[in-house]
Every structure is written in structure tokens, then in C-alpha cells.
Image: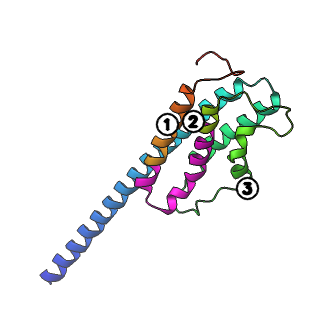
Amino acid sequence: MTNVTVRVDEVVLGDEDQEQSERSQRHAANGLLAEAGEAGRRAAGWVRELAGWQTVEAHRAVLGRAADAVEQACGREVVPGREGQLDEELAYDLGAGVVTGSPLAAALPELAVGERVALAAVCALAAAMPGAVLGELARELPALAVTMDAAIEAGRTAAPGPPVQRPTP
């Protein structure tokens, strides 16, 4: 009888250890998801700044949709246990075509080349965020978030060339 009691105690302790480990893992994952969401909000804010500088309404709309898509892809689309796929509309709004703006406009958006490169990088990184749930979340999400912040910084420091002259934010 004593052996059974010891064994039951060991099983109970094992279950408690298992539950504690699972809680720790969920807590760590929630921290990573929050970090990804914050990176997405920072990037979306920068894309909204770019949209605000546009004199053509159609370009403002395209960049505004891209900003919303960046925020969504880095936030509520990053869900462990899901397939990591973007829906078609979100993927379209994050496509590289965002750098050329609206096809209805007569000219390209008012963006410096460096801003275009950074914008394309931000959109590609945002599109990759939901897929991180399929791999090693702890390795991939922080790398994507740090790279996104670097892309924003590169875009902010890109020297605007003619005809893009605007005050620095």
C-alpha cells in the first residue's frame, strides 16, 4: 500500500510539474505574440505616415490598407494552432505592388527609393508573421520583429530624392 501511495504522489507531482511547464510555455508564447503585435503596430504607424504624405488619394488608400494589413498580420493573424496562412485580401494588401500604389493613379506614390525598399520589406515580414506558428515560434517571431524594426528605421532614414521633399517626423 505504501508503494501505491508513493506512486500516486509521484504522479500528482508529475502532473503539477507538467501543468506548470505548460503554463510557462503559454506565458512565453503570449509574450512573443505581444512582441510581434507591437512590432506590427509600430510598422503600421510608419506606413500610415507614408500614406499621410501622399497627395494622390488613391495612393493614400493603398498605403492605408497596407498599414491595416501589417497590423492585422502581426497581431490577430498570428495564432498558434492555426495554419499560418493569410486570407487572399490580406495577402493582396501586403503584396509588393504596394510600392507602386494605385494602378488608377497617373504617377507613382511619393516615396524615396529607400522608403520603397523598406515598405516592401515591412509588408513581406508582416506576411511571414502568421507562418511563424508553424515553426519555432521563439526563434522566428523575435527575428521577424527585430528585422521589421530595422526596416522601419531604414525607411525613416532614407534620403528623399526629388520630387519627394518632406519634413522629418
Q: Secondary structure at mark 1?
A: helix
- Classify residue 93 as left or right of residue 140: right
Q: Residues within 10 Å of mark 1 (few under 14, many from 20)?
A: some
Q: Residues within 10 Å of mark 2 (few under 14, many from 20)?
A: many
Q: Are marks 1 and 3 in contact (CB under 8 Å)?
A: no
Disc number at residue 88?
A: 3
Q: Are marks 2 and 1 in contact (CB under 8 Å)?
A: yes
Residue at far front of view:
162
Whether residue 131 is visible here, answered yes or no, is yes
Which stretch did the figure color magenta?
119-141
In the rendered structure, which amino acid carries the disc numbered 2? Ala
In the rendered structure, which amino acid carries the disc numbered 1? Asp
* Quarter-of-image position of residue 51: top right
- Queried whether the magenta region covers residue 104, the answer comes back as no
Comparing 33 with 107, the one in front is: 107
* Quarter-of-image position of residue 104: top right
Q: Main secondary structure of the magenta part?
A: helix
Please tell me whether residue 140 is drawn above or below residue 9 in the rendered image.
Answer: above
Q: Earlier in the sequence, mark 1 or mark 3?
A: 3
- Queried whether the magenta region covers residue 135, the answer comes back as yes
Disc number at residue 149?
A: 1
Asked which colour scheme the image uses, the reply is rainbow
Whether residue 75 is visible here, answered yes or no, is no
Q: Locate the N terminus by quadrant.
A: bottom left
Q: Position of residue 142 (x, y in %)?
A: 43, 47
Disc number at residue 62?
A: none
Q: Residue at x 53, y 42 (%)?
A: 37
Q: Position of residue 29 (x, y in %)?
A: 43, 52
Q: Which residue is mark 2?
A: 43
Q: Earlier in the sequence, mark 3 or mark 2?
A: 2
